[in-house]
Amino acid sequence: VPVSGTATAPHAAALSLSPLHPVVELAAERLATADLVAAAKWGTDSPIDDPAREQQVLDNVAAQAQQLGADPDEIRTIFRDQIEANKVVQRGLFQRWTDHPDEAPTTKPDLTVVRQQINQITSALVQALADTSGNRGTFVCGPELALATVQVHYENHLDALHTRALHRALPSICRD
Ligand SMILES: O=C(O)C(=O)C[C@]1(C(=O)O)C=C[C@@H](O)C=C1
């Protein structure tokens, strides 16, 4: 079944009824990195909130949007939500690890390496957003977003925390 025109997104091949599936899938993949970020920061002086890094992410996505002919301000707004959602997961995990120290991570990923991974997903997500610009402005955007969210939820076996965060990531995807 031919789906949306997102040949550049690696996961666009997934069978889906929703053209927004790649967008929601990449948002979920970006949220999955929050587990690694949290593990990298746990027990260190690095705070969950890093405004300088956020600025860097937002400036990068705006520049990429411009190159793709997408609206930089719209992409910035969408990524403010991706970042807030990422922090929902990080805070949730810190709380869990504080309450249950036996569940805390025993290995510490390198934050620099994790951020390179985030950069790749971020870039693929900007591309998917540019590819679906038309879809995101129609009256069926909401239903298509809801359908893709249900599908990604089941495909990725999201737990309650990541489900809550995914919903935090999506309010700015549809234009109206
Ligand atoms: O890179 C980090 O330190 C992260 O926590 C990830 C991230 C993001 O989503 O890009 C989220 C929160 C921080 O304030 C900065 C960036």
Image: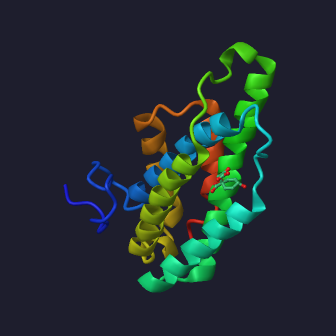
Query: Which residue is more in the foreground, 91 or 139?
Result: 91
**Quadrant of residue 45 in the image?**
top right
Name the residue at 76% across, 46% down: 48
Residue 82 horizontal side relative to residue 158, left or right: right
Query: Which residue is more in the foreground, 11 or 155?
Result: 11
Name the residue at 51% across, 59% down: 119
**Residue 160 vertical placement versus 115 (above, below):** above
Name the residue at 40% across, 55% down: 21
Q: Is residue 28 visible?
A: yes
Residue 71 horizontal side relative to residue 154, left or right: right
Relative image position of residue 76 (x, y in whole percent)? 63, 73
Name the residue at 74% across, 25% down: 96
Q: Residue furthest left?
A: 1
Residue 71 horizontal side relative to residue 135, left or right: right
Q: Residue furthest top?
A: 102
Name the image quarter holding the C terminus: bottom right
Coloration of the structure image:
rainbow
Name the image quarter holding the N terminus: bottom left
**Quadrant of residue 127 in the image?**
bottom left
Relative image position of residue 105 (x, y in whole percent)? 63, 24
Q: Is residue 176 visible?
A: no
Please count the marks in the image: 0
**Residue 123 vertical placement versus 11 (above, below):** below
**Quadrant of residue 134 in the image?**
bottom left
Relative image position of residue 82 (x, y in whole percent)? 62, 57
